[in-house]
Image (cartoon, rainbow, N blue to C red):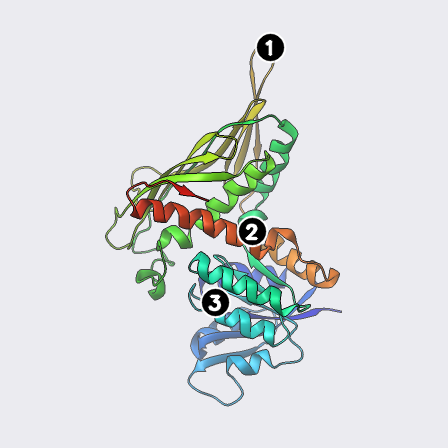
Amino acid sequence: MSIGIAIIGAGIFARREHLPAVQATPLFSLEAIYSRSKASADKLAKSAAKPVKTYYDSPTTSSHALDDLLACQDIDAVIIALPICVQPTVIQKAIKAGKHVLSEKPIAKDIETAAHLIRWYKDQRREEIWSVGENFRFFEPIVFAVEQIKKLGGEVVSFSVDLHAFVDETDEYYQTAWRQKPDYQGGVLLDGGIHYVAALRCLLDAAGQSVSTVRASICLVKEDLPPFDTLNANMTTANKRNGTFNLSYGSLFRRGCQIRVVTTRGAVAVSPSEVTISTHDKRATLEKKFRFPPGSGVRKEVAAFAESICAKEPNPRGSPDEAYLDLKLLQGMLESGEEDGAAKRI
């Protein structure tokens, strides 16, 4: 028997990722789509493989509001992809209505809001599953790299995150009104950077470590990406190993992404399409490269959400607690940057 699901939010990510992922998951049956406007809900609905009901706020229409969607008995679960500051309220409404929830990252605009939301959810003691959608935890190169770090073993020597990108006026995400005038900390550094924090935490955890202290600087390179678009941080782990976190969305002449973890037994470097494993024998350094097809991890994330509903057991990769720790680390770096590099305990 399929699980009835609705997509709440009809923006870019819902169109590119959530809709295809739901339709590729046999356990799900898409029943409805909600957006703030009828036009955007209808537009996404037209891309669906079968007719679906649409719900919206504007124009006001009887029986077509979000509360009406949440009252539908044929909808068991929802995927929520709304502006960052709107999501917590909708997450609570959906859970109160008896729906399983997969909400997009970040979990909330700040750790105070996130902690309140997690406490509320745990206090409810409800059977509904709430997962936070951090697709990098399901992204094949990251998953493979985690396995390889565990196989390598050894102690962490160093680590680094380097993401250099350039967001220009033609970018679809840039054209989103709530992203152009963010009402949450960090702007694009939170919205996009949270992925790379999650990835780093996964890789360090595979080596038995976590970040304990950060010192960071932040700045705005492109004036149309307020409040900040560039972050450079020094990190220290619990066992006193050092690493760096360099993230920029205003880098026109340097592009690329790589996350690297070095241990006493080898190194693993991850890019969106490749994982490189370096080891050493008595004679030479050995290097193996593994290529991966284009992807995002969203299909596996959505499939895991469906499986967790059937099993009545949350998937740990979607844990709100993990999403909170992602946000705590990123917020620590932002706060350090705002205080001229003051050390922040994580």
Looking at the image, is mark 2 or mark 1 nearer the viewer? 2
Q: Secondary structure at mark 2?
A: helix
- Rounded to the nearest angstrom, the CA distance separating label 2 from label 3 is 17 Å
Identify the residue shown where x is 30% and y is 46%.
339
Give the numbered dot on residue 204. Answer: none
Q: Nearer the viewer, mark 2 or mark 3?
A: 2
Q: Is residue 9 visible?
A: no
**Callout 1: few (<14), some (14-19), or many (20+) C-alpha neighbours within 10 Å?**
few
User: What label does residue 282 carry, if any?
Assistant: 1
Q: Nearer the viewer, residue 55 or 179?
A: 179
Residue 61: image location, x then y, percent: 47, 88
Residue 324 shows in this picture: yes
What residue does disc 2 label? 322
Label 2 is placed on what type of residue?
A: Glu
Q: If you read the primary sequence from the N terminus, does the residue marked by circle 1 or circle 3 appear first?
A: 3
Q: Which mark is residue 87?
A: 3
- Rendered image quadrant of residue 148: top right
Cα separation, mark 2 vs mark 1, equals 40 Å
Amino acid on which the number 1 mark rests in the picture? Lys
Q: Residue at x 57, y 50 (%)?
A: 297
Within-10-Å neighbours for mark 2: few <14, some 14–19, many 20+: some
Q: Are marks 1 and 3 in contact (CB under 8 Å)?
A: no
Judge the density around disc 3: few (<14), some (14-19), many (≥20) Cα neighbours within 10 Å: many
Q: Residue at x 56, y 12 (%)?
A: 284
Q: Amino acid at mark 3?
A: Gln
Q: Secondary structure at mark 1?
A: loop
User: As drawn, which residue projects farthest toward the top?
Assistant: 283
